[in-house]
Amino acid sequence: MRYVFITPWKIPQQSYLYDFVNEFQSRISKFTSITHIYPTSPINQNELYAFYAKEFKKLSVENPLCIAFDENGKNSSSAEFAKSLDQYESRGEKMIIFCLGGAYGLPAELKSLGRIQLISLSQMTFPHELAFAVLLEQVYRARCILSNHPYHHGEISSLAKSHFIKNKS
């Protein structure tokens, strides 16, 4: 399985998330091939679709699977996300393209480029750099879940336990 992350921006070295992003890209690469594609110079909202179309074409995959992140997408737990990635791999997907937008999201025309699965990281709005960092951590967590690595504990939190116990009374 190959993971390709396409963003219309590059995280600058001075960003407080730069080291985090590099760390999790490195961790994911121990499980599978990973590529981050971004423009070499800034692009505006009107150029966004052309950027994605050009990058999809370069990947030379017919009808690729794209997991696009959108606030209206499906919410899922880390375990459900891991299960989805496992199912994609089991049915023979060779590549998953993860698409994140910029300040104004992803272009509607993205749907014409491949099979799109909309996922929401949260109903909250995050800066795009933070959303990318969260996505990378969740992809790493998913790979750990699938390989029974201890990174993901999968247990109910102490706070949730106390809430459930209190509410059952």
Image (tube, helix red, strand yellow):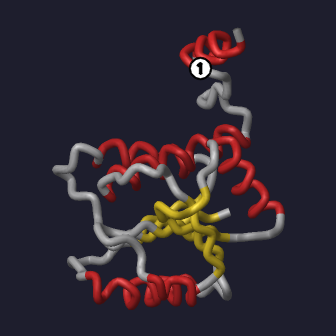
Q: Is residue 21 above or below residue 163?
A: below
Image-based side of 41 in relation to 51, left or right: left
Q: Of residues 142 and 125, which is closer to you in this image?
A: 125
Q: Give the quarter of the figure containing the C terminus.
A: top right
Measuring from the top left, give residue 8's x and y in whole percent: 33, 73
| Residue, far right | 91
Q: Residue at image x 70%, y 70%?
A: 94
Q: Residue at image x 48%, y 88%?
A: 109
Image-based side of 154 in relation to 106, left or right: right
| Residue, far front | 169
Measuring from the top left, give residue 92's x and y in whole percent: 80, 69
> Where on the picture, by quarter, is residue 159?
top right
> Where on the picture, by quarter, is residue 41?
bottom left
Task: Mark 1: give few (<14), some (14-19) or many (20+) Cα within 10 Å.
Answer: few
Task: Give the amino acid at mark 1.
Answer: Ala
Q: Give the quarter of the figure containing the N terminus.
A: bottom right
Q: Of residues 72 and 31, which is closer to you in this image?
A: 72
Residue that label 1 marks:
160
Measuring from the top left, give residue 88's x and y in whole percent: 75, 63
Q: Is residue 58 above or below residue 153?
A: below
Judged from the image, the secondary structure of the residue bearing numbered disc 1 is helix
